[in-house]
Image (spheres, helix red, strand yellow):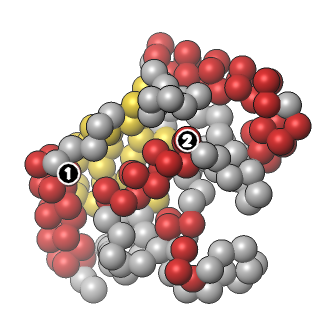
Amino acid sequence: MSKKSAIAILNKQYKQLNKNPIQGFFVGIKDNNILNWEGTLMGPEDTLYEEGIFSFNILFPDNYPLLPPKFIFKTPIFHPNIYENGSVCISILHNPGDDAMGYEDASDRWRPVHTVESIVLSIISLLSSPNDESPANIEAAKLLRTNKKEYKKLVREYVRKSQES
């Protein structure tokens, strides 16, 4: 796939998202570059992240959709599957094929049929149901397993700080 194909696909997905928006997800094109999106994700209702206001970037490779984009929260967020630098660690954003570590099935990883919509819905789901078995943030995963009260307290602090940004 060429960069030209990636641009055409992303233009189509961007228009589709604007036509049928996802609740709490707002996105725009950064610096007039369709390969670089920025936006805001509101913390999903009925989760610890409810009322959070999290800004993010989505960076698409030139050969999208053959390879996945990177979804990076710019607003600090405390979650077992989000690195401290804001990068989201979720199966569908991992390169296609077999996992060298054996943690994921190839069917759980990136496939070109995924769209920005399926990525966002997966991230919203991840905020509702963190996976502490293959963490990106070890501290968050450990707290979730051993001290849920403290975990919830820290998440709520991050949510409160997100509202101030």
- Residue type indicated by callout 1: Leu
Q: Find residue 12 and report its horizontal and vertical position in percent.
A: 14, 64
Q: Which of 62 and 145 is in front in this view?
A: 145
Residue 91 visible in the current orientation: yes
* Outermost residue, front side: 46
Q: Is 56 situated above or below 33? A: above
Q: Find residue 76 and report its horizontal and vertical position in percent.
A: 57, 32
Q: Which of 69 and 128 is in front in this view?
A: 128
Residue 54 visible in the current orientation: no
Nearest to N terminus: mark 2 or mark 1: 1
Instruction: Name the residue beneath numbered marker 2.
Output: 128
Tell me if 47 is positioned left or right of 142 in this view.
Answer: left
- Residue type indicated by callout 2: Ser
Q: Is 147 situated above or below 64? A: above
* Snapshot quadrant of residue 15: bottom left
Q: What element carries label 2?
A: helix
Tell me if 64 is positioned left or right of 50 in this view.
Answer: left
Tell me if 156 is positioned left or right of 68 in this view.
Answer: right
Q: Is 12 situated above or below 131? A: below
Q: In which quarter of the image is the C terminus?
A: top left
Q: Find residue 145 and report its horizontal and vertical position in percent.
A: 83, 42
Residue 17 numbered mark, or none: 1
Q: Is mark 1 on a helix, strand or loop?
A: helix
* Outermost residue, right side: 146
* Snapshot quadrant of residue 40: top left
Q: Residue at x 53, y 80 (%)?
A: 107
Q: Classify 10 Å Cα crowding around label 1: few (below 14), some (14-19), many (20 and above).
A: some
Q: Classify 10 Å Cα crowding around label 2: few (below 14), some (14-19), many (20 and above).
A: some
Q: Residue at x 50, y 65 (%)?
A: 93
